[in-house]
Image: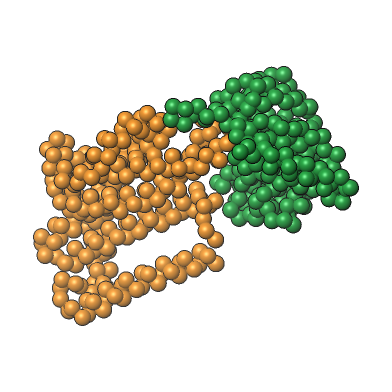
Amino acid sequence: MIQIRNLSVFYESKNEKVKALGPINIDIESEDICAIIGPSGCGKTTLLKVLAGIIKKYEGEVLLNSEKLNPHIHNIGLISQNFGLLPWKTVEKNCILPLKIKKINTKDKEIQDKMDAMMKRLGIYDLKNRYPRELSGGQKQRVSIVRSFLSKPDLLLMDEPFSALDAIIREEAQELFLEIWNENKNNTFIVTHSIDEALYMGRKIIVVSNTPGQIIEVIDNKLFNNKNYKEDEDYSKIFSHIKSLVKGGIKE
Amino acid sequence: MKKFKRLLGFIEGFLMVNLLWFIGAKLMNSRILPNPLEIYKNLPELFKKDLAGHVGASLYRVGWGLLIAFVIGILIGLIMGYSDKMNKFLNPLIYFSYPVPKMALLPIVMTLFGLGDLSKIIMIVLITVFPIIVSVRDSIINVGKENYNVLTSLGASRLQLFIHVTLPSIVPDILTNIRLSLGTAFSILFFSEGYGTSEGLGYFIQDSWSRINYIDLYSGILVLSILGLVLFILLDLIEGLACRWNREG
């Protein structure tokens, strides 16, 4: 479970403190998948960076399983927009990197078998010894999915994870991701600017307003994980509701 | 197939240089530009004398010079790349000493450190160390932040960040730098071996010149070139192993 209390993030520019985010207050149950949506520049990515432990200077409190969020204690997986694969490591080495960082024996047969099985399932097993620059965008993304789920994260964070893919591959990738997510049910946050993506991928949709980013509304999304969400009778109603929220979030 | 093509290109280059040399020699018809065949014939003779000793002496100086330059350069480069404070503190020093023509310091270095190997090694270090510092520092500063993010969120230690991100991303730059420094080091060597030594290829070439022995002179140049070439090929191999992720094609 994630508890965020009075979280604010400031940017220092010259002698001024500029508020980029907050105050944010929200509780999210474990096994939940949340889409964070808002106008560009609203601080969605900043929020994600706080959760990832990349931004360490913030006010307020972020608790994961009632302990202060800390990458050294918690297991946090991050999938960035460009998938965050290290170009100098092969697909296999990239996948086991999180385990290596956590000092887990990666030669362990169980881990190897699990990795091989996941790779085979996502169709990247044959690419094991390739380097990221030899892969297509869709392949890179599947590698980053294997990497994230292999280390069984307490918290999985995704920053526009599908936006670098073209439309057809994107749909497949989203479906595949949800399939694997449903088997693991890791606490997940997906930052997105696409309302459709939020409607399909987010059990909860968190709408954030423009600078400083604040939560306007948290929507329990009944279209979640419904492949034919666009055909649902409420689709256009919810869609335009979120759209007006996002637009309204841009303060004059 | 790729290797075969490279070999073919290699042979082509070798033949072209020699052909041009041969034509030039025939056209000039002067002892200042001898026929390459004569030089190749002369080589075994020279090795029977003491050419190997000269090669050894030169390699010893270049080897130590570059090794010391890289240890110092990488160390200072790392410090400057990692610490903003140290960068600000040391940068003026680097900035001002960079353009000093250090070759001109040869007399001072020789007066201070004698005529032996030490002064020649110091010359190589003095000249090559500054570009190494600057390139290592810039290389570290330019490592993409996003490469660190994933590891930071995994709770990686500073050492782990260094091993998994910083080091592999600066290796290609360091190898490029070794390549450049190698060329520079041989030029410095050629010049500084003109003084206070009777060993080394630089000495050998300049000595042949003063004896007006053009065949020996060209043999020396040829051996020096081959030496550079061998080292370049060695670097290619290392680069192929260490930077496979970075290679085109």
Residue at 48% across, 42% down: B143
Residue at 23% across, 74% down: B35
Counting every numbered tag in the picture gives: 0
| Side of B37 relative to A113 (left or right) | left
Q: Position of residue A78 (x, y in %)?
A: 65, 37
Q: Is residue A98 visible?
A: no
| Side of B102 relative to A7 (left or right) | left
Q: Position of residue B89 (x, y in %)?
A: 31, 30
Residue A251 in the image: above or below residue B10: above
The image quarter containing residue B164 is: top right
Q: Residue furthest front?
A: A252
Which chain comes out orange in the rendered image? B
Which chain comes out green in the rendered image? A
Residue B4 in the image: above or below residue B224: below
Depth order, front residue of B177/B22: B177
Which color scheme did the rendering employ for the protein?
A: by chain
| Side of A105 relative to B146 (left or right) | right
Depth order, front residue of B201/A96: A96
Q: Residue furthest bottom?
A: B27
The image quarter containing residue B65 is: top left
Q: Position of residue B153 (x, y in %)?
A: 61, 32
- Quarter holding the C terminus of chain B? bottom right
Residue at 45% across, 48% down: B172
- Quarter holding the N terminus of chain B? bottom right
Residue at 41% across, 67% down: B10
Q: Position of residue B170 (x, y in %)?
A: 45, 43
Q: Is residue B123 visible?
A: yes
Depth order, front residue of B157/A74: A74
| Side of B153 relative to A27 (left or right) | left
The image quarter containing residue B67 is: top left
